[in-house]
Amino acid sequence: MAMTRIEFPDWLVIQPEVKTALMEKTPVVALESTVITHGLPQPINFETAIRMEREVRQAGAVPATAAILSGRIHLGIDTDALERLALSSDARKVSLRDLGTTVARFEDGGTTVAATMFIAHAAGVRVFATGGIGGVHRGDTGDVSTDLPTLSRIPVAVVCSGAKAFLDLPRTLEWLETAGVPVIGYQTTVFPAFVSRESDLSLNSSADSPQDAASILRAHWGLGLQSGVLFGVPCPEDAAIPWAEVRQAIAEAEAEAVTAAVRGAELTPFMLDRLGTKSSGSTLRANLALLRRNARVGAEIAKAFGG
Ligand code: PSU
Ligand code: MN
C-alpha cells in the first residue's frame, strides 16, 4: 500500500492506527465525544462509544474519536481514554470557543460537532458521524449553536439524524440554506427529526446510496466550495418514536428549562436528560440505534469517497 506523507499539525495527537490509515488512504470516520461526556447517561455513554467504533470497523473503516485529555487534543483514543471520559464528572463540553481554554488549563473535554469538525479537518478526515447537530433554539434567546457557522466553513461531511426535535428545525434549515450548506436526506426526502423519522420539512436533495453520497461530496468540494455537507439519516424504524409523542415530551421539558433558568451551553444536555427520563428509556433506545446506524453509514460513505 502506498504511503502518503501528510503534514499533521503538531498540536494534534493522532492515534497510530488512525495515522497509518490516513497515510495509506484507508477510510477514516471521525466521531465526537460530547455525546459521551454530556449527551448520554452512564454507563450507556461508554457502551455506545464502543459500539459506534465497532460499527465503523465492521463496515471497513477506522474510527477516530476526537477528545481532549489533560489539555492535549486527540484524534483517535483508546478504550481506557473513552472510559475516563465516560466516567468523568468534570470533563468540559468543548465547542470551538472552548478549545483554547481547555488546552491552556490542561483539562479533559468532550468535543462537540463544531470542535470535532475542526479537529477532523486538521488531520484530513472528511467524514464524521454523530447523532444530531446543534441548531437554532426555539424562542428569541438568540441561542444558535456554533455547529451551524462551523458547517458553513469547514469542509467535512457530517452524517447525523438531523437535529434534536426540541430545536427550531425550520429555522435551523433556513440558517444552513443561507450559509450554503447542502443538507442531503440519506434514503429519505425529509429532514429527520432525530428520534422521529418523519418531519414536515422536505429537502430538495437526497442520496440513495453511499456511492451517490460520495459523488455529491466529490462534486461539491471539487468545485472548491469550502463548506461542510450534512447528511440526514433517519433513525432505524424499529427504534424510532412517532413525532406526536416526542412533541408532548418536548413541551414539558421546555417548561422545566424555563423554570430552572437553564440556558446557553447547558440547555442541550438538560433537554437530553429530561427527555430521556420522560420517555422511560425509549428515547434513549432510539438515540443509541441512530448513533450506531449513523456510524455505519458514515463508514460506508467514507469508503465510497476514498482517501
Ligand atoms: N444532540 C444530541 N446529543 C448531543 C449533542 C447534540 O442529540 O450530545 C451535542 C453535540 O456535540 C452538539 C452539541 O455538537 O450538543 C451542540 O451543543 P450547543 O447547542 O451548545 O452548540
Ligand atoms: Mn447553544
Image (cartoon, grey):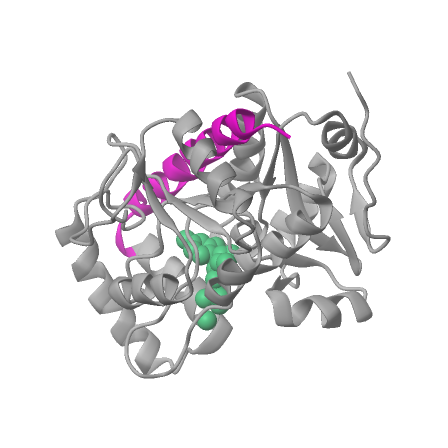
Magenta stretch: residue 283 in it? yes
Seen at 56% across and 51% down, the residue is 224
Seen at 81% across and 33% down, the residue is 16
Q: Is residue 128 above or below residue 275?
A: above
Q: Is residue 95 above or below residue 223?
A: below
Where is residue 155? Give x, y as percent.
56, 51
Determine if residue 127 is in view: yes
Res 123 quadrant in image:
top right
- Horizontal arrangement in the rendering, residue 31 relative to residue 163 (left or right): right
Image quarter (top left, top right, bottom left or bottom right) of the C terminus: top right
Res 97 quadrant in image:
bottom right
Where is residue 220? Give x, y as percent.
47, 45
Seen at 81% across and 65% down, the residue is 106
Magenta stretch: residue 148 in it? no
Magenta-tinted stretch: 278-307
In this view, the residue in front, 139 or 207, is 207
Magenta span: predominant SS is helix
In this view, the residue in front, 261 or 224, is 224
Res 102 quadrant in image:
bottom right
